[in-house]
Image (cartoon, coloured by chain):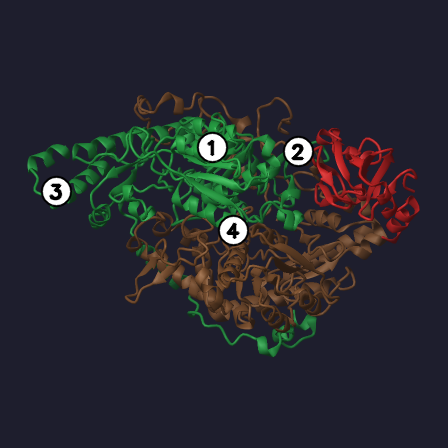
Amino acid sequence: MVPTDLRYTKDHEWVRVDGDEATIGITQYAADQLGDIVFVELPAPGKTLDQFATFGVVESVKAVSDLFAPLAGEVTGTNEALTASPELVNGDPYGEGWMLRLRVANHDQLDDLLDPDAYDALVAAG
Amino acid sequence: MLAALGIGSVDELFADIPESLRASGLDLPPPEAELELAARLEALAARNRTELVSFLGAGVYRHWTPPAVDQLLIRGEWYTAYTPYQPEISQGTLQSIYEYESLIAELVDLDVVSASHYDGAAATAEAALMTCRATRRERVLVSRAVHPQVRATIATYFEGGLEIDEIPLVAAGDAAGTTDLEALARLLDDPDRPVAGVVAAQPNFLGLLEPMREIGEAAHGAGALFVAFVEPVSLAVLEPPGAYGADIAAGEGQPLGIAPQYGGPYLGILATNDALVRQIPGRLVGMTTDLDGQRAFVMTMRAREQDIRRDRAASNICTNQALLALAASIYLATIGPHGLRDVAATGAARAAELEAALAAIGVERLHRGPYLNEFAIRVPKARAVHRRLLDRGVLAGLALADAEPDDPALADALLVCTTEVTTSDEIRRFAEALADELTTDRPGPAPALAEATR
Amino acid sequence: MSVTGARLEPTLFERSRPGRGDGKIPHPPKDALERIPAAARRSTPPALPELNEPEVVRHYVNLSQLNYAVDTGFYPLGSCTMKFNPKLNEWAARLPGFAGLHPLVPDEVAQGTLQLLWELEEALAAISGMRAVTLQPAAGAQGELTGILMIRAYHRSRGDTERSEVLVPDSSHGTNPATASMAGYRTITIPSAADGGVDVDAFSAALGPRTAAVMITNPSTLGLFEHRIGELLEAVHAAGALAYMDGANLNAILGRFKPGEAGFDVMHFNVHKTFSTPHGGGGPGAGPVGVGESLLPFLPTPRVLREDDGTYRLERPGERPESIGRLRGFVGNTGVLVRAYAYIRAHGAAGLREVSDDAVLAANYLMHRLEGTYDLPHPGPCKHEFVASAATLKKRTGVRTLDIAKRLIDYGFHPPTIYFPLIVEEAMLIEPTETESLETLDAFADALIAIAAEAEADPDVVRGAPHTAPVKRLDEATAARNPNLRWRGMTGRQMPCPD
């Protein structure tokens, strides 16, 4: 069961919204599928993203995956700890392994995302 | 096996090829037993003239390769091994590549060296592409004194998507034949077309030493990266690219124990600093440990490569020149740092000897600037003279008109080089033959000729 | 074969001692470098290791014994064609007449090599049914780039500037889409049909005025001949696009199918696969490219030409303006091409056809032996390779293809290609080639069957494999997270030698 205070994309990103600020990462399922994560490529602060646009790349030893923005907005920060410790994504994907912060452009876009039950169902369906 | 499969003939296994697509036979020369084929190959090899006294360099150099190199290289465990994707049974290849990366890193004074690229030209083209990716700019400046084939290769890779501008050379004076710094400054000063990278060679194609530090400073001042094209043996004695501010070094590794072989396989050297490591194409080998804590080596940062990134890979390179990187490593290990310095210094000494011998017969250098072991000489009707010297068994370098047909300044010039294998005897023979050819067309006092060839 | 028992080696740097190694060349005069300006000179010599020749020799001999190689054992690597490397070819390439030839000599000095290259082009053209061949590309991937750049030049020459897409099947080798990107094209990936072949209908639907090319491997990366290839090629040409064939699997169809005759416009060869040139631990290879009439003008320069008087020469710069130019220095990986030439001349037409016959027979035999033990997604006759899957075994025992691969090492075999093609779960792509004996094939099948039994009875022994190799499984995560790509002495993150 995934955290209940988050919303999810079908590409396995999560988002936590706190007022105008959104924090984004990938789910435990995604991290498990990728295996040991070795590098996360993130955009520079100031960059504007559309909803579901690619905002970066996550690399494991043997795979690579694009990262898609659950919501549109301007990037306000990235998790610099991931440069030295990308394994945080594997160990604590919803906490220390967060990837991106952005200023939400349109809160209505939350309706386009999956709630925890819907995401769990997606993962169960395989 | 046919019995086990329950079929009558192997043709049944090809039944799925539609009749209309089946090959209509295959027209090839009849096969030969090994004895006959060996004779055929020897006959072909004998049709090449390799007995010439050679002063030809221009990017490929004759050196003495200690026999230990080939005797080690011919071990089946080296040359019949596959790419080390299964590291547990490839520690030989993997450690040797790590050592290669480390040896070249020392020579170029940069942190990260790829496991090899196809050759110097392709490596430089990839280096130029790296500068565009890293800076997100689309224009590269390449000195006209970079090897013409390297420039042509960059042009092919850049065609249609990215821009290349040529940096002209200084036309006259002490710096003639080197990259024109003023022209470079003007080319860099275009806010609408910012430059991603500047490429220059050391020594350059004409054998001259370039103001690399100044070129690098100009590039960085404009927010561009600096790519140095280098010759590895010269790095035993010349300042390395990492020391003069190059961000990327590319080069041709052939001089490190690899035979000329009419063009390849050679060794593309590509190196950069830690900041650009994710941009470097090709394989990388790193050190790690196994489950027991044992030190071991493994291909790493694989997610950059084509089999994982596919259409998002920086380069499509898969097969590289691994065996040649091994040859270069064995050469460096055998020759050692003092030996390598002696190779470079002896080549330089012979070049000075050649310059003097040619000056004594009235043949001058085309340029005035310092060189290491290669330089251009002014020879009227250079192509014709080159031909006639060939008939006399002397390969008088490269007629520059062949390499740069559109450059009138190089029409009457030969590019000549010496290495540690060049002998004083060969230099004498070259000078005598050249003097002879040059006096054939005009009257000349015989005593002067005797002076010149003493 | 066995690399077990071989000892690990310190690095050259650890073996280095000051003052060792000398006597290879005479010392130059002390003032040799005085005329070089100080600013251009190196202030400190490079810190290269100093070893005596006996130490160098032991180092590289010992290291070599840590390697598995074709000369030590069987490599059933699908898509790699790890056939025996004939020793005549090594001798030929080393003939001083070939090895000592500088690439910029006048043509008259290089007649032997030029003739060899010209004859090799003719042979490859005959084998492929293509009109002409370039030997310039240094590897298959560079051959792919050459082919796609020629296709791009072709469309541009016709003023056709809208074509921005290349279509590939989802079973394609990663180099195909990577090549398309390098040439500025967008890759459209078409899912394969249920039988593993290209889905001709899906391709047809995706073909259109934006399609520059399709890139097809035939036989496919599943080892299956694309029997609808005629239909597909027609659809491609009807849409105004061109068809590129990835020739990696040519070992299956020598003398049986000619891509040029069938309608492919361009293809590359991997001489280090089909034509036996050795892999060298990762290279060198060569990737010659064959073209049909439409792409002839765009071939890289210089071409090797034969004059009416029977002499040979290289094309001169500017002689053929429509050429796409050059992809690398000089004429090609000539030393590798000498080996391929010798191989082709040794076999002749009948010999090459026999190569394919035997390669296909061996693959089918192995597939038959593994029936019932592993999943075979495409159980019909295969060509030179086939895909097996450990998917069911994984569900039952938790043992994966990776574990089976590592356990094969303990049995003395190099693993097959694993997790490729991407469209088969827990894939093992197995290609025996034609140079293995029946005993070897049976021993390999026996080993795979034994491992399947171990997976049921004692899965840990499989999951912990290899147990007998010089090193165990490696920490690849740390290697990628904190890369150590260069020796920096015994400080920092260097680990000491096991000695």
Disc 4 from disc 3: Cα separation: 50 Å
Q: Nearer the viewer, mark 4 or mark 2?
A: 4
Number of the label disc, if any, that sits on residue B333: 1
- Provide the chain ID for the residue under circle 4: B
Q: Report how far apart the C-alphas of labels 3 and 2 lie in the structure.
A: 66 Å
Q: Residue C494 or B30: which is nearer the viewer?
A: C494
Single out the mark in the foreground, 3 or 2.
3
Give the mark nearer the N terminus: 4 vs 1.
Answer: 4
Residues at marks 3 and 2 on the same chain: yes
**Residue C275 % position (x, y):** 51, 59
Mark 2 = which residue? B288
Q: Amino acid at mark 1?
A: Ala
The residue beneath circle 4 is B160
Q: Say which mark, if any, is on residue B100.
A: none
Closer to us: mark 4 or mark 1?
Answer: 4
| For marks 1 and 2 on the same chain, the one whose residue lies earlier in the sequence | 2
The chain to which mark 1 is attached is B
Residue occupying the point 75% across, 36% down: A74
The amino acid sitting under disc 2 is Thr
Q: Which chain comes out brown in the rendered image?
A: C
What secondary structure is marked by label 2?
strand
Q: Given the image, on which type of amino acid does mark 3 rest?
A: Thr
